[in-house]
Amino acid sequence: MTRILAATLLFVLATAASAQQPAPAPDRIIANELDLAGWCEQEAKHRYIARNITPYQWTSRYFERSNVLHVEGSLRVHGEDVQVRCRAARGAREQYAVIEIDDPAIR
């Protein structure tokens, strides 16, 4: 009887723990140049911060060509400006956006 009670208790606890897991975040859609510019800045900064490097002074310009959104930006890192380029099709999920950072330390 004790084994059944213990097994039932474990099952209930496991079920309650799995029910508390947060739902995955919905995919963000890149609808315009501003969406891509925000994603590009955050993605570039995250890549540096993950390597314990603090970037600052983000500047960018953005434009669209043939339904492809483009961002050309720069971050100040190591006392130098590092060029960052991002692109994505209008309406694409952010997971399909492309980022290029002209810094060998990030490749």
Image (tube, rainbow, N blue to C red):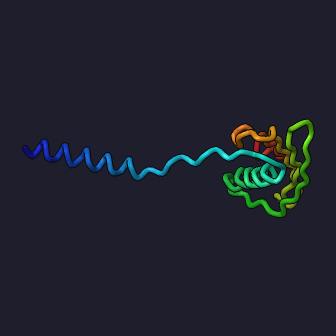
Q: Is residue 57 above or below residue 24?
A: below
Residue found 74% across the figure and 61% down from its top: 54
Foreground of the two, 102 or 66: 66
Q: Is residue 60 left or right of residue 29?
A: right
Foreground of the two, 36 or 32: 32
Q: Is residue 85 left or right of residue 45?
A: right
Residue found 87% across the figure and 52% down from its top: 73
Report the number of numbered marks.
Answer: 0
Q: Position of residue 55 (x, y in %)?
A: 78, 60
Foreground of the two, 15 or 43: 15
Q: Is residue 92 above or below residue 62?
A: above
Q: Quadrant of the N terminus?
A: top left
Q: Is residue 14 left or right of residue 43?
A: left
Query: Which residue is farthest bottom?
Result: 57
Q: Quadrant of the C terminus?
A: top right
Residue found 16% across the figure and 47% down from its top: 6
Q: Position of residue 100 (x, y in %)?
A: 82, 42
Q: Quadrant of residue 53?
A: bottom right
